[in-house]
Every structure is written in C-alpha cells, then in structure tokens.
Image (cartoon, grey):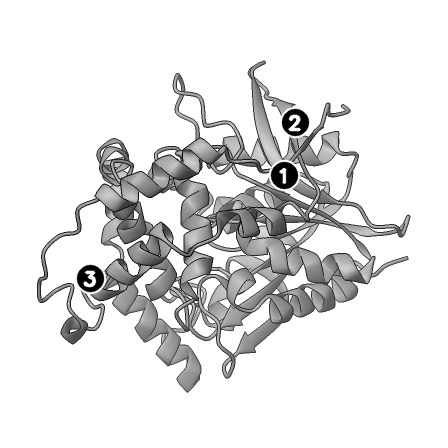
Amino acid sequence: MSLQSTPFKVAIPDSALETLKAQLKGAHVARPTYEASAAAGGRFGVQREWLLEAKARWEDGFDWRAQEARINQFTQFTAPIPRPNGSVLKLHFVHERATNPHARTILLLHGWPGSYLEFLDVIEILKKTGQYNIVAPSHPGYAFSDPPPTGEDFGKEDVADLMEALMQGLGYTSYAVQAGDWGAAIARMLAVKYSSVICTHLNFIPVPSSPPQIDSNAILSAEDEAGLARGRDFIANGRGYSDEHRTRPATIAFVVSSSPIALLSWVGEKFLSWTDEDPVIDEVLTNLTLWWLTDTFPTSIYPYRDPSGNATDPKWFIKKPTGYSNFAKELLPSPRSWAATSVNLTWYRYHPKVKGGHFAAMEQPKLLAQDLCEFLDQEWPSK
C-alpha cells in the first residue's frame, strides 16, 4: 500500500486568532477562593494568580505566528489511511527522512494532553544525526488529524491499527516505537500485534502495585519507594480529571470547550502539576492555542474510557526488546523489577538527579533522545 500524502503547513487564519483574542478579553474568571489561592499551593488545582497571568499573556504578547513558523520548519503531511472496516481516516504527521539509506525508523507517539508538538525538540536532535527516519503523527482526534468516527465505539486498538497502516503506507516494514502516557498503550499494542515493530522504548510503564510475580517482601530502593509514594498520592489526589474523562467524556467536553479559559484551567493545570518544573507560559500557550483553534479537546479524551493496552494486562505483555527511561518525577513510576513483569525489559535507565516529569520529550529532549539512541544501538544496531 502506498499512501497519497499531501504536504501540510500550519496556517491558522487571522480571523480565528482575532476571535480567540476577543473570547479571551470577554472571558469570565471565577472569584478568588482559598482552593485557588497561593496559600493552597496548587493542591486543589490551578491557581487563580497563574491563570490571570496566563490569560493576560495569551491576550496580549503571545505570538502564535512565531510558534507557527517554528512548527512549519518540520516536514508535515496529511494522508488518508484505510481502515479494516473499509472507511478512511485522515492522519496528520511529521515525517523526516534520513539521507542514510540504512537509517532506522522511529515512530513517536504522544499522549494526553500532549500533541506532536512535545516531540519537536526530540525530532530536531534525532534529525541532526542523519541516522533515523522519524514519523510523529497526531492521534485521531488531535491537532490536524480527523476525529474518531461518531458512529462507532472507536478505541485504542483502532488507533494502533491506523499507526501500523501509516507506517506500512510510508514504506517502513520495520520500525521502533517511542512513547509515553497513553501513547505507550498504543506502542504496546503495536509491539504485540505486528511483526514490523522491532523494539519499543517507553518512558511510562505504570505498574502501580506489586505484581504477583514479585516477592512482596523484596526490598526496594529509597528512590523506588519515593516514586511509589508519589504514585499513590497521584492516584488518591490527582486523578479526578481521569475519572471525569472516563465516565462523563461528553459532559466535560462541552464544559472545557465552552471557553478558552476553561481549556486553560483544565489542561494548563496538567502542564504545571505533571512537570518537574513549571514550563514557561509561552510553551503552555502554544499547546493550548493548538488545542483551541483545532477544537480537539472533545475528540481527544476517548482513550480514557477504553481500558485496553493496560501495562498490567498479560494480553499486552511486550515480548519484543523494550527500553524504559524512568524519570524521577514521573506521575506513576514503576520499579525496574515491576516494569519487567510487563515488558521484555532489556534496557533501563533511571534519571534521579535531572529535571523531568510526565512530559519527558518536552522537559528533557536531549536526555530522552540520548536514551533512545543508546537503546536502539543495543537492540537494533545500524548497518
């Protein structure tokens, strides 16, 4: 199968940017509360002071056109991807081909509330080596890809099948996958279902409780204990959003899509609380502008109601060689021995002293790219 790829450039109309600015100027911000105050320290969600600062920057000073120019430095396409049921779904993707005819191919998969934008720095680093063909798609329902069909219960396995079809259509009969967040579930499905996947490199392998294969009396390191404590805190105090996405995706979609301030609150909070250090506001606003102008929040949260691809499900154990980059401030980090019950763990690196949380590609692109290259050199050496 050969894809009919169409070159793509991001080109948001001036009128859409003007409408966004008007919506921001007219948007209501809720009155002060203790929960949204600095005194609460972000324990109950986004702080009002940060929200007002971000709103003011978004209204006046944030330069989308500069961000758009940077995004368009990367080679992008759209292509219709045929599905097993006979329908077609258009995917948007970055595609950088290496000059080396023996280059290895990497599929980069984002999660929520990420997008292909979080991989741009990693792509730039990998591209400079000249050793890799790189494909970084927008999942269905994200950015410039088509939304999931409204007439069927579309889920993660459907996404995995589309990604395999994309790679085959581009002519890549062998490739590696790098992923985090729910992109890691797609990587898991691809590795289990398709022989074309040589190996996987993940920065998210959530095994939140001791697997039955592990001696319950086994001694864990202080770092592992700290990570597990952080995971327990996230499950107890940080997963309200996930329950809403899972049980009432229709309702929360209407709420968050009603105002750019609603989106800034709901999604911006994740960029603050899931990172090791707060990203600069313009980085958050670039992501949120993409979300708002493509109206893709409602079509982005379907994975939450689909439990398949879970790291603890034996059906999705990865037998292919797998690397795990474990960043110290990940939301749900797993001890090495626990992660190894979920994948064929042949490469592992823990990053205890660097800044890095849930968005490793965005927070630590050099380290993630370095880990990925080292893993590939071990498991899939270049010719």
Q: Quadrant of the N terminus?
A: top right
Amino acid carrying mark 2 in the image:
Ala
Residue 98 image point, x, y percent: 83, 50
Q: Which residue is mark 1?
A: 93
Which is nearer the eye, 51 or 173?
A: 51
Q: Secondary structure at mark 2?
A: strand
**33 to 108, vertically: above or below:** below
- State the CA–CA distance, disc 1 to disc 3: 36 Å
Amino acid carrying mark 1 in the image:
Phe
Report the mark closest to the observer, 1 or 3.
Answer: 3
Q: Which residue is mark 3?
A: 48
- State the CA–CA distance, disc 2 to disc 1: 8 Å
Q: Which residue is mark 2?
A: 79
Report the mark closest to the observer, 2 or 3.
Answer: 3
**93 to 377, vertically: above or below:** above
Tell me if mark 3 has few (under 14), some (14-19) or many (20+) residues whose alpha carbon lies within 10 angstroms of its own.
many
Q: Secondary structure at mark 3?
A: helix
Of the residues under marks 1 and 3, which one precedes in the sequence? 3
